[in-house]
Amino acid sequence: MLNGKTIVLGVTGGIAAYKAVELLRLLVKSGASVHVIMTSSATEFVTPLTFQTLSGNPVHTGIFNLVTEQEIGHISLADRADLFIIAPATANFIGKLANGIADDLLTTTVMATKAPVLIAPAMNVNMHENLIYRENEEKLRRHGYLFADPVSGYLACGWEGKGKMLEPALILDEARSALSLKDLKGLKILVTAGPTREEIDPVRYISNHSSGRMGYAIARAARARGAEVTLVSGPVSLGPPSGVELVNAVSAEEMRSAVITIAGKFDVIIKAAAVADYRPAHREVQKIKKHCGEESVELVKNCDILAELGKMKRSGQTLVGFAAETENLLKNAAAKLEAKNLDMIVANDVSAEGAGFNVETNIVRFIYRDGRSEELPLLTKETVAGEILDRVLILRR
Ligand code: PMT
């Protein structure tokens, strides 16, 4: 979504300016061409050289800079931008923008742009609650400015409360959302992701290598495209995607009850989770002691959540499963599509390099009920997520 886009990142003078460096890195990593404008206060917190080095573009700090104005004038920046992001945005900047004051390069350029503007405020909790600030924010929202809302936490000024800038990874989600077509608007989508853990005793468990990346990418992309998304996630180390309702589950049984109780209300269900097929027959209350001889753990079969969803599928609901295979990809995946009553299955050979578990990329093949199949090349999981959602839309026509 950000690949090839031109983004202007405005940095104003707050302590969270250091986090704008991480945001810049994430934007560049996503393929965007980023031009940074700093207010003079921002340069007191982080040097322009840091932003210049990471963006690979000159940093703009003053409206009367002869060199940058000649090379790339501020109006040209305003015209070329696909998106403006202001992070951090101080109460002062927001106040100026809300009242039409354009007295520096950043406010002038933001006022001159027709591109969407995403504002990530960061300030003291009392300033954030101040009624004049609230009026300014409301006014900007009414005029179509987008906000990446701050969160509660410990603030650099010593206070605790709402005013902490949203984490850069979540601002990135909001940026993707700002640039996406809202072609999934009106759809409720349930995604599952990550592994499950089946406990043997208080310190040991059976699990698999799923990192959750594939499912989280689908949830993020669906939300960016306007869907209302619930993500049921096994234990992973990823942060929750912005704007997605997250339900945590540890074991297959927990995931089953989380999914089955809410499944009926979703238009689309996409099951990327790697659910353990078996669990120990008994979970020992105390840690099992090491003995000299061999030990074995008796396993019992877990319920197949996807098969259950296939049985209860209501008309108008689209059910997409995944198949993680190491051999006979097409044959095994097609059998799962049939047995679980799916509309489409995403087959991945998890033994192929760059595919499957715990990597940033995947190689998938879509298989449909009518026997058709499509093979995709090695792609990032973000791109695969977009491709899956495109197919879901086609299936629902
Ligand atoms: O999380 P990542 O590190 O990004 O890795 C991505 C992935 C490899 C986990 C993902 O691409 C993937 O293949 N997910 C499905 C893994 C899996 O469990 O495949 P399976 O072939 O064993 O199961 C088939 C389908 O049935 C899956 O949709 C699975 O969610 C579902 N299932 C399986 C067993 C079970 N008891 N209940 C289920 O619902």
Image: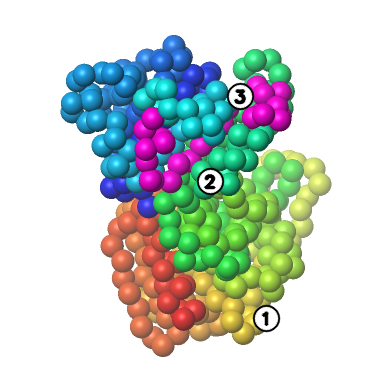
How many C-alpha atoms fall within 10 Å of the one at disc 3: few (<14), some, or many (≥20)?
A: many
Figure quadrant of residue 275: bottom right
Judged left or right of residue 119, residue 51 is left
Residue shown at the point (53%, 60%) measured from the top left: 226
Q: Nearer the viewer, mark 3 or mark 2?
A: 2
- Which corner quadrant of the image does residue 60 belong to? top left
Give the residue pinned by disc 1. 312
239 lies above or below 127: below
| Callout 2 amino acid | His
Q: Which comes before the other along the chain, label 1 or label 3?
A: 3
| Amino acid type at mark 1 | Met
Q: Which residues are magenta?
A: 108-133
In the picture of the structure, the residue carrying the numbered disc 2 is 143
Secondary structure found at label 3: loop
Residue 262, how many percent across, how many down?
Answer: 71, 67
Whether residue 157 is situated above or below residue 78 in the rendered picture: above
